[in-house]
Amino acid sequence: MKTIRTSERPIAFRSLMLAFLSAFLIGAPALAGDPPTYTFQTVDPPGSTNTLLVGINDRGEVVGRHRTADGRYHGFLYDGESYSILDYPGADNTFAYHINAQGDIVGYFDSGLGAKGFILGQEGYREVEIEDTYGVIAAEINNRGDIVGLLFEAACDTCGFVIRKNEVTRIQVPGWSCAFASGTNDSGDVVGTYWDNPGCFINPIEDTHGFVLRKGAFTTVDVPGAVYTHLQGINAAGEIVGSYILAGGAFSSDMHGFHLDGAVYTLIDVPGSSSTGIGGTNARGDIAGWYQDGTGLHGFIGRRD
C-alpha cells in the first residue's frame, strides 16, 4: 500500500458567480464562461421517508439510498423510468454511492460490524477489502474501474484511498489528520475533503476544506466565505461539484451546493429548499444530490440546460 503525502497549494480565485436556480428555467445553451443552469427533478423511491442521491453516470442513471418506514436504509438505482432496490446480502443497511458508464455500482453496507465497501457488477456483489483496516466506504468508481473512498484504521484514524489496478494508495493531506477521497474522473484526478479531528470520523463544520489531487499535487479548494467545503465529484472536463456551509450554519439547514469550473463558482440551491447538497456530476454536466424542505429530505437530478 502506497501513501500520497505531497505539498499543498491554494487555488487562485478570479471571480465568484452566484446563480440561485429556478426549477424550470429554460434558456439558450450556456456559452463558454456562462454559469450553468439546470432543470430539477425530484427523485424519491416509493415508500421512502428520507432520500439522498449521490452518483450519476454518463447515461443519466442515478444511485443513492433511501430510508423506509422500518428505519432501515436501502440503496437504489433509478434509470429514469423505474427503481431497483439494492440490498447487500445479509446487511442491515445498504448505501449506494456511485455508478459508472458500465453500470458498476459502489457504496457501503453495515451488518453490525461497521462500514464495509462493496462493488456491484455483472457478477453480483463483492466486498471491497483493504488490508489492515476495520472499515471501508467506497465512494466512486470511474469508467476505468478506479475506486476512491474512505478507510478506517487503528485508533479511528481515517484517510482517503484510491484503488487502481488492484493497488491501494492511501491519500493524506500533509499536516491534517483526516481525509476523504470522494470523486475521481477518467484522467485519474481525485477530489475530496480534509479536516483535523484526530480519533474521530465525524468531520466538524468549522475548518473543513476541499482538495483536488492531480498528478501527485494537492490543491486546496474553499468556497469563498465558507467554513466547510466538501468536494464530491469531478467530470471529464474537470468541472467540480460539492457542498459548502457558511459560518454559523448547520448540516441540516444551511448547506448549499456549488459548481466550480476553473475558478468560477456557481452556487446551487434547489428552489424552495432550506438546504441543498450536490453528490455527483457526469460528462454532460448533469448533477445529482439531495435537498431539504418542509416535508423532509429528497433526492434530485439537475439536468443541465
Image (cartoon, grey):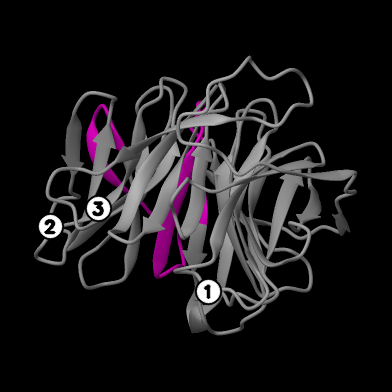
Label number found at residue 90: 2
Q: Are marks 1 and 2 in contact (CB under 8 Å)?
A: no
Q: Nearer the viewer, residue 173 or 73?
A: 73
Mark toward the start of the polypeptide (1 vs 2): 2
Residue 173 higher or lower than 271, as above or below: below
The secondary structure type at the circle numbered 2 is: loop
| Residue 97 in sight here | no
Badge 3 density bin: few <14, some 14–19, many ≥20, Cα 10 Å? many
Residue at 67%, 75% in the rendered image: 177
Residue to which mark 3 is pinned: 66
| Magenta highlight range | 120-149
| Residue 239 in sight here | yes
Label number found at residue 250: 1
Could you tell me which quadrant the C terminus lies in?
top right
CA distance for labels 1 and 3? 22 Å
Could you tell me which quadrant the N terminus lies in?
bottom right
Horizontal side of 288 relative to 245 (left or right) equals: left
